[in-house]
Amino acid sequence: MWIRVVSFLARLGLAAVWLISGGIKFADPTQTVVAVRAYQLLPEELVRPVASALPMFEIALGLLLLIGLAVRLTAVVSVVVLAGLIAAVVSAWARGLSIDCGCFGGGGAAEVDGWDYAREVARDVGFMAMAVWLIVFPRSPLALGPRSRPLLSSAPQPEVAES
């Protein structure tokens, strides 16, 4: 029973992360462009399309987790996205850039140090841990997806990997 409670909390927590992050970026698209550009990883012609798509993608992930639909798949995609975001932050740190990550609004040039980057990476690793938990234990209360909601039987059932 406790596994389902932890899964429920991880699902709602990760949903909140994606919804808040995406919502803030969606509300301020100009600042999102500034944040994406600050990483200096993309050619200029890709900065705006990525900055436009990222908030919608994050909101979609958050909504899927919130309603409990395709939880395992959404968690896998979350791990991939978080790994990319962590790699981008580590890349900025390694190249000596001084930027705000823009993860929850803002972004662009900022006075930051190694501790700021380490905190951002640690935070995102924590979010990634929540997603990994949901990959292993996707079933939780109030989920709408047939492979995401708890089985009706009261006997413990093994988790079955979705294909």
Image: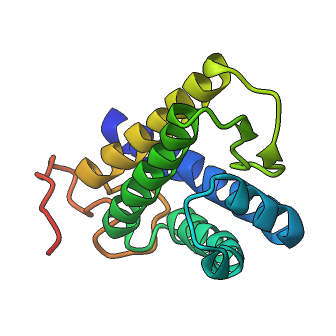
Name which residue lies at 69% across and 72% down. Answer: 51
Q: Quadrant of residue 6?
A: top left
Name which residue lies at 46% across and 51% down. Answer: 82
The answer to whether 95 appears left or right of 156 in the picture is: right
The answer to whether 157 appears left or right of 81 in the picture is: left
**Taking 156 as reference, is 138 above or below it?**
below
Name the spot of residue 112 as percent of width and height, x first: 75, 26
Q: Nearer the viewer, residue 69 or 55?
A: 55
Name the spot of residue 50 as percent of width and height, x first: 62, 75
- Quadrant housing the N terminus: top left
Name which residue lies at 58% across and 56% down. Answer: 15
Q: Nearer the viewer, residue 147 or 40?
A: 40
What is the image's colouring?
Answer: rainbow
**Taking 61 as reference, is 102 above or below it?**
above
The answer to whether 68 appears left or right of 93 in the picture is: left
- Quadrant housing the C terminus: bottom left
Q: Quadrant of residue 54?
A: bottom right
